[in-house]
Image: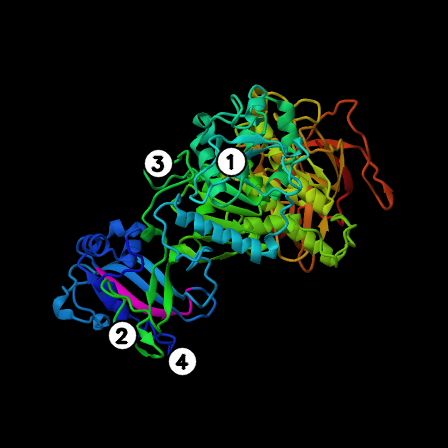
Amino acid sequence: MEPNRLCKRCSRALTASKTLWQPRPVGDPDWAGERFFHGKNAKQMLIDSVIAAGCHLCTQVSQEHNFSRAGDDQRVMVECRRSRAFEGDGRDIPIVSFSATSRAKWDDKWASLPDPSKDEEPQGDSATTPLATFKLERTDGAKSLLPQRLSDGSMFALPSSTDSPEAFGLVRHWLDDCLNNHPECKGSNFERLPTRLVDVGVADNNGQKKLTRPRIFVPNATSQTPATIPYLTLSHSWALTGSSLRLTTKNIEDWQKPEAAEHGGIPIDGLAQTFLDAMRITQQLGYRYIWIDSLCIIQDSSEDWKREAQTMAAVYGNSLLTIFASGMGMAGGQGANADTCFSGRNPLKVYSPIITSPLSDGAMGGGAQSEENVNTAGRTSFYAIREKHKTNVDEMLWGATQKNPLLSRGWIVQERLLSPRIIYYGADELYWECRLHAVSESCPFGTGLKKDAEASQSIWTANAKSVYQDLQDPFPASLKTGMDMGNDNEDAKYAQHLHELAACWTTLLTYYTATGLTYPSDRLIALAGMVTAIEESKGWTYTLGSWQELWPFDLLWGFSTVLNVEMFNPGWYPDDSEKRRQDRDEMAQKLLKRQSYPESHASTTLGLPSWSWAATEAPKSFWFGSSGSLTWKCQVDVFGRTTTGMQESGILALKTYKKQLYDVPSIDLILTWDDGENFYSKDEVCCLLVLDHLARGGRRALQLGLMVVQVQMAENSPSCEVTDDTGAMTGMRFYCRRVGKWENYWGPLVINRNKDEETAVYLC
């Protein structure tokens, strides 16, 4: 498997092409490319070019999904051209495309075939199957994140396994580059150490482990603990490592003993392979300590678990590097969901081939880059990057709940976002992610992280860390910090900044609620580390999954399913209509079959109030609008507030406008119910106005709010009034529970703040 080797067909096309290596003529946007015949069909390409010749370029083409779909009568063609539209930045980029084509007769566009007499003419119906597209990027045109030489001076060789000296050298290169050149990623505080660490020993000059057994190390147990101790952390799937030995009250004493003592250290035979692999990675990177949850938290002590769960912000935030054992096991024979960090692979399928230009100093150079000879002296080299690999780090994370057992875990969200640096193991290639960029073995230039409101909408992608970083970073010094979003006279810049932060937070929640938890009761505690970090930085108040400073935006959640969405217009139900009576009777029958709501504010199975997104187990989506500032927002305060955000009940007091659903004007509304059966009689549903954005003229508006039903509260329930600068609100208290969300997109006003009465509503 010699890297960068080309077959005769690829070499001939790249050498003969003039379009590929010369700038586009000025004023000629339609400058045509050139097409070259490659082979009779995809099977011949696989046998002759991939297997026999070991062509690096053809090997990558054979990995594309369409390659197996190409018909036997379709000839493989190579097109060489230049494009300014490929990246969207106006650069004139060389492009090489492969396709399988059938034609009834010779095409004039194929006249550039170098030797038509020896190449078979395509036959059959006119049909084209695209196979692969490569963009050529100069290896010296931008900073490549793949090294040419390693730190020890040796040439970088393509590793055939992620468990190889070359692979470990690559990870060290990425880590050293981040530590030395990324001020955005600095900040690990090795003086704030976890309660316990795993001491894996050190490796000798041959990379061999000196200690045969790891042990539990308690940093503050002795006065001989160094002032600073760099350590790594591990994120793993309990579904794959659940049978491993765990730290308990029975073995903790023995596990802390040195190896030489009787029964000292952690028995290796009972550990998950993922844990052993992570310990090996720690050693190979030159470090001694790693934090692994099931080995560093006492698993049969609820007190220790609760205490340690509150420290995740420090554990992951202060680690040098987090190892993500994705368990994808795509190669090496492990199969999917494998208990290991490592995988074997063909490196030609992973790494982008390097193509050498035939031009030298503006003229045609010497021999082509062929399977016999590669003479690169004085010529420019290019990475041939597959189109799908230009954002392949994003592709790994996008849709991860379906293909990656680790990234589908709820606990993994904060572990990923808190960690300053992550190395992803377990797939067929290595992925790196830090606060500056993401990179992989097949993407030499990486993916820079975006820091804007729109980037937050791509939360599954590598932008997630930058979105969280915006939440975790302190407020800019130029902004005021003593204001809330309920004031009409709030500072415009501060309001806009809070609006952007609300977009970041609610999109993080969209990401988080799409993941799974073994125990639904962990829904809030699994975010405790992130919450702690944001609290320390921003000084915000956290209540049952929401930030008081970001209200009311994170109250506008809905279930991510069309089954809960209903189009509704009160005009469809006149007061005396038979349809309305039938609807009311049908809903009443459904209500009789269900358990009635308890007469208290703890109204959900998780013991959380109905307004909290964490009250129910299902993926949620949140409203977010970036088109200008809102005209009005309801004022929100909280009663029955908790200091920890744990599972206790709370009542929100809203200063808003209320109208019965059937009393709103005849307007088409979008109703998103919190229950898939929509079993609430619309006679008892009320609409609360939360956000109001009037269009110019004031006759149409973007209005959003909550649907609620009234409940009877216990006598000892909190009974505070909503107040503003003018004094207490008056009127009868209206206690209610949330049953859904309503939306009016630029229709006539649902609730008119100039005509309808403002009231105080207590949301349970």
Label 2 belongs to which residue? 366
Residue lying at the far left of the rendered structure: 117
Q: Which labelled disc corresponds to residue 334? A: 3
Q: Overall secondary structure of the magenta stretch?
A: strand
Q: Is residue 294 above or below residue 748?
A: above
Q: CA distance from mark 3 to mark 4?
A: 55 Å
Residue lying at the far right of the rendered structure: 727
Residue type of the residue flagged with mark 1: Val
Q: CA distance from mark 3 to mark 2?
A: 46 Å
Which comes sooner in the sequence, label 3 or label 1?
1
Mark 1, Cα crowd under 10 Å, few <14 / some 14-19 / many 20+, is many
Pick the residue in front: 163 or 121.
163
385 sits left or right of 684 in the view: left
Mark 4, Cα crowd under 10 Å, few <14 / some 14-19 / many 20+, is few
Highlighted magenta segment, given as a residue range: 76-86
Labels 2 & 1 near each other (Cβ < 8 A): no
The quadrant holding residue 736 is top right
Residue type of the residue flagged with mark 4: Gly
